[in-house]
Image: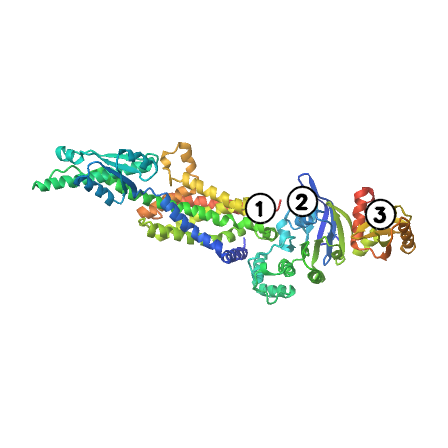
Amino acid sequence: MTSESRITVDGLIKRFGDFVALDGISFAVGAGEIMGFLGPNGAGKSTLIRILCGLLRPSGGQASVAGIDVASDPEGVRRRIGYMSQKFSLYGDLSVVENLRFFGGIYGVPRSALDGQVAFVVEMAGLQGREDSLVATLAGGWKQRLALGAAILHRPSVLFLDEPTSGVDPQSRRRFWDLIHRLGADGVSVLVSTHYMDEAEYCNRIALINRGRLITLGTPHEIKARSVAGELLAVEAEDVGRAIAALREAPGVRNVAVFGRLLHVVVDDAAARASELKARLNALGMAGVRTERILPTMEDSFVHLVGRAGRSPEGAA
Amino acid sequence: MRLRRIKAIAVKEGLQIVRDPRSLMIALLLPLMQMFMFGYGVSLDVQRIPLCVLDNEASQQSRDLIGRFAASRYFSLVRALGGQRDIAPRLDDGTCRIVLVIPSDFSRSLNDTGAGRLQALLDGTDSNTANIAANYAKAVVSAFSISLQLETVQRKGGVPQSLTPVDVEARVWFNEELESRNFIVPGIVALVMAIVGAQLTSLTIAREWERGTMELLISTPVQPMELMIGKLLPYFCVGLADAAICLALAVFWFDVPFRGTVATLFFTTSLFLLVVLSIGYIVSVSIRSQVGASQIALLLTMLPTTLLSGFAFPIDQMPALVQGVTFLVSARYYILILKAVFLKGSGLTALALPILCLALYALVLVVLAARAFRKTLD
């Protein structure tokens, strides 16, 4: 595995003064793998990506990208990676093609190949007919696909995408993920961070990260199975506060969490407990209680795992 | 270092300059405005000094004298006063800077004894102007007395032989006045080039930080040296255009005699441009906000260039320590070169030493600029 992995991170630590942004993170990403980093804002996702791109120096631990150590040879790393930063960072006062030709020149894409690469990226990003538009005038989804295109113009083997889909409409997000999967199929290793739980399902593997620590790592299926120990019931009740208190004390209930207007309740046996819980709430004078068995989402896992890690450190995965 | 990357950056930077016509206009109009501002503001020329006259005699001769003052380009007659007590208020409210008082026995004593007496009252709050005005007044009076003597001699049918010697002092003043402009304008060219040059590049890196484009740029394999050269190149071209504007104004508008060659002028100007562009670049790298960088660049170029370059204050009259410091002011060499090229027509060999100093200065700053940039977010 190690010989094949494109990204290897071992005990990585980053401190900003007294603040510990990354607290001993370890993982590896293989060739063609799409690895998602999931976590709330401030969890340390951007810091991790910036270190792996050679933009920040690690305070401790080791990290190598494409077989090159990021601390000792950041230039070597930069030549082999593509990076899409969280904030859109192409030149708004330049046209689509001017931006692409600029990055082609910077990355040293051979002149003979540059025209072809630019045309390929324009086609991939669906920007035909917009080649000469100033980038500042493009809509969000197009900007984002162009930024991805600029990052892969030089055909890097490793791609870092820092919250690439934030502020983009669902349709564009879907289309964007299709592009990422095409790249993965071509053998490009992709490390992508997001705080959209649903996007995590598109990744081959996911790392949950919170407050600089890696909480768990695995395929979406594994994580959901591992974290939500039991079956899941969605419960709708009027008085959420009292309902939570009552449900926590009920037999067979392992966890209760608020999801919008609903409560997600982890139980040992959904079919058996559904009517029990409904009766219990009705007994407290709550009318209109509804229960429904649901499949756990990534968000359930995340809430479950973060809650466990936060409350009792010894119980963390 | 790869030419390809330098070219990519230079093209990108050039496109951004062209795409922002407002900034480009400012970059080209600013030196024009500053040349006029400093050209007239700093000039030691004193012309059209407002003059009031209190003529207590009102004779043919007193009117002749007043007529000479009025005809001179150094004075402009604004008012004839009615009495002694009008003098102070007119000087106080700035109606005039100088009051000429002609006594009631002016022509009588002139004709009787050959020596008339006049009084000139000057507003001393601006001692420089007062001093110059007093000397101009002496010159006008002296010219008046010479023609008076000439007239007297001719009327007596004689041939002018032993006239009172021409007032040499007055003539010197006139020459001096003309030369002061010739000395000052090359200094102003240097001052404007220093200010504008550093301003041009002070925004270039700070802007990338502010717009967030820097994060992506430093994630690429671009080298600090490549970035610097690529960024300075287009601004160097704009700077040369600015220099052409300033130098053309100096020659064609301010009438400074130009005796040197254009090649020498632009070679040395290029060296000075490299210095000031590098200063702006270093500031832009160090201060990641456009407003801050622009302010610091202005301070760093304007203060030493006005105070320590010999432009406004003669270096040989400064304390020894300060004189030492002036060797670190690049404008010192450039002003020296400009004056020599303009007024003496000096070439490269005559100016070898200051050119060498300037070239060394440019080299050091370019290296510093290349090393100032760090490819990290830490």
Disc 2 residue crowd, few under 14, some 14–19, many 20+, Cα 10 Å: many
Q: Is residue B218 left or right of residue B298?
A: right
Q: Is residue B287 above or below residue A172?
A: above
Query: Between A140 and A95, which is closer to the camera in this rendering?
Result: A140
Q: Position of residue B297 (x, y in %)?
A: 49, 44
Mark 2, residue position: A58
The disc labelled 2 sits on which kind of residue?
Answer: Pro
Q: Is residue A51 left or right of residue B177?
A: right
Q: Earlier in the sequence, mark 3 or mark 2?
A: 2
Q: Are marks 3 and 1 in contact (CB under 8 Å)?
A: no
Q: How many angstroms separate mark 2 from mark 1 (CA)?
A: 16 Å
Query: Between B370 and B58, which is closer to the camera in this rendering?
Result: B58
Q: Is residue B164 left or right of residue A300?
A: left
* Disc sitting over residue B374 in the figure: 1
Q: Quadrant of residue B332?
A: top left
Query: Between A182 and B38, which is closer to the camera in this rendering?
Result: B38
Query: Between A96 and A168, which is closer to the camera in this rendering?
Result: A168
Q: Is residue A192 left or right of residue B193?
A: right
Say which residue appears at 10% left-offset and 42% top-offset: B154
Mark 3, residue position: A244
* Residue furthest bottom in the image: A129
Label 2: element kind? loop
Q: How many angstroms separate mark 3 from mark 2 (CA)?
A: 43 Å
The disc labelled 3 sits on which kind of residue?
Answer: Ile
Q: Are marks 3 and 2 in contact (CB under 8 Å)?
A: no
